[in-house]
Image: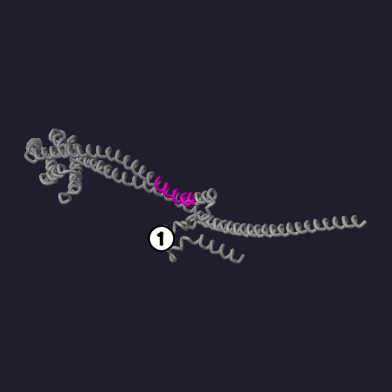
């Protein structure tokens, strides 16, 4: 009994520490070592967490990348719209200044109407000066990064280089018309002022303003083309955004599926191995088989317990076989003794029968002798 207890104890130790048999000092920082010590429920929970994290993270990255490209396209479109608006403002205000100059020339004989138009002229001149100042501030020659194309850059450079005197023209316009106020002039002075203003409005500086308007128009056309290009790019990016989102979602699902298959196999494979060993033991009665213990979770405990059970059953069968062999030996000895005893009894019976036969003969002789004597 003591020997049997020691054998069971050694079997239990061997079946419960197979992982440490190959490495007496396991590396606890190893990922596989850490995974092997997790419970089945913890592995399933971590697997689900990883699946959800990969799906959410992959989709989020897809959205971020798509939104990044979309925001860039929207910025280009908004910049083109802003440039169009600013150029249209500049062109409109220059036209208003030019138109108001003609009206002032026509209203020289109507002081009240002239004064109203002059007030508007001053307003338009101030607006034109402000818009031109903003244009020069936004489109600096030393900062070429803001331009979307080389054509736009050249058109802007042409405006900034060739029409530096636009401020002086506006200032001269306000001063000239202020000095020729018809309410302060005599009829002769009015005619002289009309002549002076007519010469000013048809002089080289004014024709230069007409060229300025033509250049602004060309710049507006360039920016309009860039707006169309930006709008087309935005539509293309919106399609690309959809493709990126669908691609990232599909990739996330694929990775999550592969991870799910790997996780399920990692959990199911040890169970399948233990089940197969148990079936082999019960069907083939092969108690030399042992289930590999690769984890320290419930499946590892089950495999170790099965190994211990197999060894205990094997030991019990061995003890039973030894007992059967002993019983067979006892049976053979008993049969031999019975056979010997039977031979002895047969011999004694034979001797007894011979003795009885001798007695019968003797008795018969005695009887015969007595009869003969009478």
Residue 254 occupies quadrant: top left
* Image coords of residue 183 (percent x, y): 15, 38
Does 256 sit above or below residue 373? above
- The front one of 315 and 322 is 322
Question: Which residue is rendered at x = 8% and y = 41% of the image?
Answer: 205
In the image: residue 71, left or right of residue 133: right
In this rendered view, identify the residue nearer to me: 311 or 47: 311
Residue at 51 percent of width and 62 percent of height: 14
The structure residue drawn at horizontal position 59% and vertical position 63%, both measured from the top left corner, is: 4
Instruction: Indicate the secondary structure of the residue bearing disc 1.
Output: loop
- Tally the marks: 1
Which sits in the foreground, 26 or 124? 26
Q: Residues within 10 Å of mark 1 (few under 14, many from 20)?
A: few
Q: Position of residue 370 (x, y in %)?
A: 90, 57
Q: What are the residue bounds of the magenta stretch?
A: 257-273
For residue 39, side relative to residue 131 (left or right): right
Looking at this view, name the residue that lies furthest to the right.
Answer: 374
Q: Position of residue 274 (x, y in %)?
A: 50, 52
Look at 89% across and 55% down and name the residue there. Answer: 372
């Amino acid at each position: 009994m003591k020997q049997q207890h020691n054998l069971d104890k050694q079997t239990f130790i061997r079946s419960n520490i197979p992982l440490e048999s190959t490495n007496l000092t396991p590396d606890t920082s190893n990922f596989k070592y850490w995974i092997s010590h997790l419970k089945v429920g913890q592995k399933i929970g971590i697997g689900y967490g990883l699946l959800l994290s990969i799906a959410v993270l992959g989709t989020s990255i897809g959205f971020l990348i798509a939104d990044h490209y979309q925001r860039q396209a929207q910025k280009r479109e908004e910049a083109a719209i802003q440039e169009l608006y600013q150029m249209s403002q500049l062109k409109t205000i220059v036209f208003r200044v030019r138109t108001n100059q003609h009206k002032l020339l026509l209203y020289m004989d109507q002081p009240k109407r002239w004064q109203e138009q002059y007030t508007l002229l001053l307003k338009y001149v101030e607006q034109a000066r402000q818009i031109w100042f903003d244009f020069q501030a936004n489109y600096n020659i030393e900062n070429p990064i803001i331009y979307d194309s080389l054509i736009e850059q050249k058109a802007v450079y042409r405006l900034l280089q060739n029409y530096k005197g636009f401020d002086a023209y506006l200032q001269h316009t306000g001063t000239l018309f202020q000095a020729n106020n018809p309410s302060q002039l005599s009829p002769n002075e009015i005619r002289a002022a009309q002549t002076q203003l007519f010469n000013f409005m048809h002089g080289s500086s004014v024709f230069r303003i007409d060229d300025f308007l033509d250049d602004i128009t060309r710049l507006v056309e360039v920016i309009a083309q860039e707006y169309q290009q930006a709008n087309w790019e935005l539509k293309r990016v919106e399609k690309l955004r959809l493709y990126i989102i669908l691609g990232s979602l599909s990739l996330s699902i694929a990775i999550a599926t592969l991870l799910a298959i790997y996780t399920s196999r990692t959990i199911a494979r040890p169970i399948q191995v233990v089940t197969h060993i148990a079936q082999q033991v019960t069907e083939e009665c092969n108690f030399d088989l042992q289930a590999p213990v690769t984890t320290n979770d419930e499946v590892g405990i089950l495999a170790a317990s099965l190994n211990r059970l197999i060894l205990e059953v094997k030991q019990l069968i061995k003890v039973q076989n030894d007992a059967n062999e002993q019983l067979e030996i006892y049976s053979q000895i008993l049969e031999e003794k019975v056979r010997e005893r039977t031979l002895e009894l047969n011999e004694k019976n034979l001797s007894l029968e011979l003795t009885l036969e001798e007695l019968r003969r003797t008795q018969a002789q005695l009887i015969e002798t007595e009869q003969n004597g009478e």
